[in-house]
Image (spheres, rainbow, N blue to C red):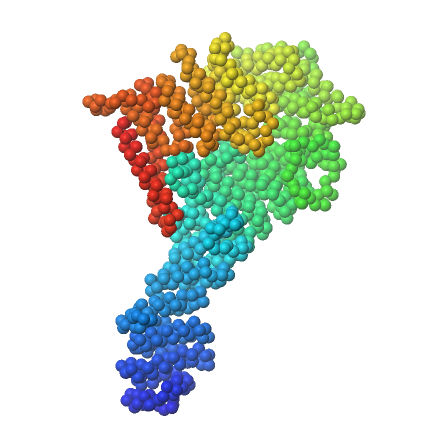
Amino acid sequence: MAQRILALAAEEVPERLQEALQSLGEGEVRGCPAGWARGEGPGGGCAPLRPGSPCSQPSGVLRRLQIYKHCIPLVESGDLHLAKVSEIIGLLMLEARQLPGHALAELATLFVDVIKGGSLSNGKSLELFSTVLTALASSKESLAYGKGELNGEEFKKQLINTLCSSKYVHLCQDIPLSGEELQFVMEKILRMFSKLDLQEIPPLVYQLLLLSAKGSKKTVLEGIISFFNQLDKRQKEEQRVPQSADLEVATVPLDQLRHVEGTVILHIVSVINLDQDLGEELIKHLKTEQQKDPGRALCPFSVALLLSVAVKHRLQEQIFDFLKTSITRSCKDLQFLQASKFLQDLFPQQYDVTAVILEVVKNSAFGWDHVTQGLVDLGFSLMESYEPKKPFGGKAADTSYGLSKMPAQQACRLGASILLETFKVHEPIRSDILEQVLNRVLTKAASPVSHFIDLLSNIVVSAPLVLQTSSSKVTETFDNLSFLPIDTVQGLLRAVQPLLKVSMSVRDSLILVLQKAIFSRQLDARKAAVAGFLLLLRNFKVLGSLSTSQCSQVIGASQVQADVHACYNSAANEAFCLEILGSLRRCLSQQADVRLMLYEGFYDVLRRNSQLASSIMETLLSQIKQYYLPQPDLLPPLKLEGCIMAQGDQIFLQEPLAHLLCCIQHCLAWYNSTVHLCQGAEDDEEEEDVGFEQNFEEMLESVTRRMIKSELEDFELDKSADFSLSSGVGVKNNIYAIQVMGICEVLIEYNFNIGNFSKNKFEDVLGLFTCYNKLSEILKEKAGKNKSTLGNKTARSFLSMGFVSTLLTALFRVLLWRYTSIPTVVEESGKKKGKSISLLCLEGLLRIFNTVQQLYAARIPQFLQALDITDGDAEETDINVTEKAAFQIRQFQRSLVNQFSRAEDDFSSKETQSLITVLSTLSKLLDPASQQFLQFLTWTVKICKENDLEDVACCKGLLSLLFSLHVLYKSPVSLLRELAQDIHACLGDIDQDIEVESQSHFAIVNTKTAAPTVCLLVLGQADKVLEEVDWLIKKLTSLGSGTSGNKSGPFLTRSPYSVGLHALNFATFLQQC
């Protein structure tokens, strides 16, 4: 029958063909497609379809449907050649547009059932399904669906909704979808994520990404990032509160979540490689979200994704610029929030992007190798973009002490932390990180590299034995030591010192380089060699050397290897150290800079390697004898002319004699207090060492006695001497003066240390200080006359920190006790020309408080503990900084009250200013949430309200203190309004006809202080508050526009009220002013 139908179709007589088709039963119609498929001609033999079954007849439509229903499994069977299948599908697609709406709906429903039933074997018929859906969407016919009716487009949407399942997402790529339909499909599938098993998500994400080529890229990316961000938050919440009942969904195991996240990131990166627009959309989306809610935009997942994409260099610059901007903005926002209680109350706590990025480093340990290169690149980019700046003509500021305050410093430190943590976590990337750090130390010699050296030091300390595999890179760096600045050389050698202890090959390479450099013609090369040799002497101890806390090195027991013990031979070390000392002795005939390094380094070597004491002391004794005049009555006792050298018309310092004496007195003091006491019964060694010890003591005693007797004329340094730097004689006299002053300081410390508080030694100390002071006054006088910038520079002090600390420890307690305990009237008899004793006490205290806060912030608890002699036995863990600081503040509060209660003639403005500054400094140690802080604020307000202070400088200091405290407690707008009213009352109104009500909130605001002092302070503080309000409005506006839930509702509700209150107060304030 199928052949007969084909024959009739070939005759092109439609009537006879229709009669023949109508005479066929349903079974015969079902068999026709297979027979036709074996035929020849266009459409694979399906040509009878069009003329024999017109859509104008219901029977024709029915036959067409039957043929479609049987062609679909036929083309899916795989029994036909591909060319035949294409012909059949092509003809069916062409004829599908002729079908009425109900037939298209039935046929589309059939396709959906086939798909859901899993009957599709090769998917060839899906092209026809796409055509059917397209034709169905254009149908205006009312189609039955359930109990109602839908038009063609609505019917199509219902079918698509049915297909929106994780199993059938890949089919959507072959289905024509409008933008609205595509958005609907994406959103529905993304909502299904939370109901799926975690392992099903990566392949589904990949299909969604492929589907995003049609559109809705932003929807897909936003949904994926949001989903994993929520999972991470749940994971953290579960770790924080393991038994929390608030968790709606039980979190998955951490390792499983991280591996799934890593797979999804790989899928996204692979699709971006195919579709660059997806990468552009990712950056664009995150930038937009970052403006609205940074916490949603930059989560650990999105940051890891960005860093993985950044490996593609076309997008790296955009991504890094975005991340660096986000980091600095986050740091600035946090800084802004911390400085204002008003903002803290009204704005939700900002997330810390630095913590997010470090979390990415931590997460990358779960096999995220695709993230590591991005982390390394970002770390170096941050360190280079925000590196320490070198001021003109000076060194870069050292920020290694205390906390970094500037956003740029925080960003630089974040970069170092990223690299250090990545180095610890990822072994394959270690060699690359080390090489890049060393390259930057070498190539950036002209700019500060301290941050890279600090990073290198942390890397070496974290794993010195691991670095043995990369020791070749370190030894290559040693070859360039001669070309580096001395500060860089010293920092670099200190950084790699732990590696020298575990790698003999690295140590030997360094020694070879240093031995070559010590004979170099370049001064910097010889200085580098001296620095290196001194480092080796400090760290390779000879057997029997005393252990000190300074020479301890953090190297874990697990890092010790057998070959280290084999190489570490004390006898070999002794020979090695003595050989180095022999090389260094030759440096004592070189320039002053080289000698100075030796003198400054010998003391540290002696402390760490005490068995070298004899060799070092003999070397120093031999050197000082060249300049010491042994005749007991000869003045002066030292040959200063031998310390200088002339080259043509220029005079240079050849021997830094003061440094030599300083080195001798430190080494001798340490020897007497340590080595000599530990020798015990070793009589032979004791007798041998008594020689240089006695020589030094006799020499220093003789020099002390004769220096006291010497007059300035003996040194040719009287008032008539020429000290100008424009002549050779003036340069020589300046060198002599600096050396004499340094020698006096050295002898002052020496005699104080050995004097045991005896009267005779104190007289010697005063005599030496008299000589020092005379010369110092002459230099100041000459410098003032010459107006020389060089002459105005203060010579470096030779007093050691230990000596200064000993004096300050006693002096500080005396100052503190004296100022807070002794009545002021007692001081009247002690007043002399210049500053009073009280003022000197306060200035000393203020310098100490500032120094501790700026340089030793981590030691503040111990510092406050040391001040409180009543609680000396408390453990460090029990120290309450706020309580200790409040105790000190109360003492200075009493002193300030006493100042205000004095008569006008006895009032000391400078002393009051210093007291206020001390209080301001100590107030920074109080916790703003503590009761002590509130008490201090209340007291400050009371002082300002009750004291009619007319001193402008004191008024400025007191109001500045009040503002700094008030802003950490609440908004200062009400305070500003009252001050404005007081200013208005004091100055009157611009319109003279208006009578201003006489009122006074703060007595400190009076006719002498109101303008311009108080007025300018109030305006400055008002400007800060307006800046805060402006910042708050911008943040809340962006947060409100991007808020999808009720998370920020309370802030958005409360903030307009607070801002409105600010506006009202400012209106009043402006009216008063």
Q: Quadrant of residue 947?
A: top left
Q: Is 893 left or right of 653, judged from the image as shown?
A: left
Q: Is 1004 left or right of 567, judged from the image as shown?
A: left
Against 82, residue 773 (above or below) is above
Q: Is 386 left or right of 637, judged from the image as shown?
A: left
Q: Position of residue 514 (x, y in %)?
A: 64, 37
Q: Residue at x 44, y 49 (%)?
A: 298
Q: Residue at x 31, y 22 (%)?
A: 1000
Count the labels in the image.
0
Q: Position of residue 883 (x, y in %)?
A: 51, 28
Q: Position of residue 456 (x, y in %)?
A: 57, 41
Q: Position of residue 819 (x, y in %)?
A: 50, 17
Question: Who is closer to the viewer here, 374 or 169?
Answer: 169
* Quarter of the figure that contains the N terminus: bottom left
Q: Quadrant of residue 480?
A: top right
Against 439, residue 1004 (above or below) is above
Q: Residue furthest left?
A: 993
| Residue 471 seen in this snapshot | no
Q: Residue at x 74, y 43 (%)?
A: 566
| Residue 890 seen in this snapshot | yes
* Quarter of the figure that contains the C terminus: top left
Q: Residue at x 32, y 77 (%)?
A: 103
Q: Residue furthest front?
A: 245
Against 862, residue 67 (above or below) is below
Q: Quadrant of residue 10?
A: bottom left
